Image (tube, rainbow, N blue to C red):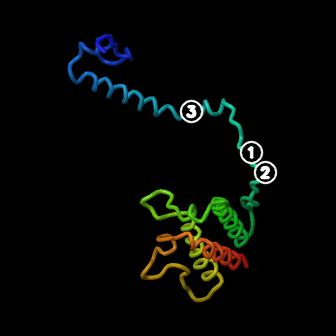
């Protein structure tokens, strides 16, 4: 170690042997190197994008056992109700695609603890919103929550279990059909 030379000549004290430095010099040199890496890191995304653009990446090929989801296209121009329903279909299909092929346990797994939000929580939330805003508000009728209540305002997202998946998905599809009418 006594013969090691500072690796970056731009560092302060370049050319001095580590043994010749003061006691805190090694940590100071490491801190300087870390700062330089951070500065380089700020420029790295541009470099990474340029390298990614110039490199060839093998596209993921769907296995024959995987089925392609028939997703609604991004809507174009339409009348207001048609445009609303088209965007709803587009985003509903995006959520359904995320849920497709997952087990019940995976659907209730929190995506980023400590948040309780999971894919099933999003499905149940969408059920609440479609029921409240599309089915009830636009079609008329008495307001009621599907999962939430005054005592449990987050029941659509919190404390979900795998045994809730089938009933929650069925209710979401029912609300979708009712909203599309």
Give the residue pinned by disc 2: 64
Q: CA distance from mark 3 to mark 2?
A: 33 Å
In front: mark 2 or mark 1? 2
Q: Is residue 130 above or below residue 3?
A: below
Residue beneath the point at 66% across and 66% down:
92
Rendered location of residue 165, percent (x, y)? 60, 71
The spot of residue 56 in percent (x, y) is 69, 32
Residue at the image point whose x is 51% and y is 58% from the top? 111
In the visual, does 7 lie left or right of 25? right
Which of the marked residues, 3 or 1, is nearer the chain's N terminus?
3
Q: Mark 3 vs mark 1: give the one in front.
A: 1
Residue 125 image-quadrant placement: bottom right
Left or right: where 53 falls relative to 153: right
Q: Secondary structure at mark 3?
A: helix
Q: Residues within 10 Å of mark 1 (few under 14, many from 20)?
A: few
In percent of width and height, residue 123 lies at 59, 69
Most distant residue in the right direction: 64
**What residue is shown with label 3?**
48
Tell whether 15 sits left or right of 90: left
Give the residue displayed 62% in from the left and 76% down from the top: 167
The CA distance from mark 3 to mark 1 is 24 Å
Name the residue nearer the viewer: 103 or 151: 103
Can you say whether 39 is above or below 97 in the image?
above
Of labels 3 and 2, earlier in sequence is: 3
Q: Which residue is mark 1?
A: 61
CA gap, disc 2 and disc 1: 9 Å
Q: Position of residue 48 (x, y in %)?
A: 56, 33
Depth check, mark 3 against mark 2: the one in front is 2
SS at circle 1: loop
């Amino acid at each position: 170690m006594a013969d090691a030379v500072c690796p970056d000549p731009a560092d302060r004290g370049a050319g001095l042997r580590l043994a010749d430095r003061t006691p805190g010099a090694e940590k100071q040199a490491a801190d300087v190197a870390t700062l330089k890496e951070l500065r380089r890191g700020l420029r790295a995304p541009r470099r990474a994008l340029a390298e990614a653009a110039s490199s060839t990446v093998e596209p993921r090929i769907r296995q024959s056992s995987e089925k392609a989801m028939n997703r609604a296209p991004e809507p174009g121009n339409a009348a207001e109700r048609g445009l609303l329903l088209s965007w709803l279909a587009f985003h509903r299909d995006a959520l359904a695609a995320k849920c497709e092929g997952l087990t019940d346990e995976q659907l209730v797994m929190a995506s980023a603890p400590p948040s309780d939000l999971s894919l099933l929580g999003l499905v149940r939330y969408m059920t609440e919103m479609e029921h409240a805003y599309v089915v009830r508000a636009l079609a008329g009728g008495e307001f009621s929550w599907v999962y939430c209540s005054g005592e449990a305002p987050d029941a659509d997202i919190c404390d979900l279990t795998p045994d809730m998946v089938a009933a929650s998905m069925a209710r979401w599809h029912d609300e979708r059909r009712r909203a599309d009418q």
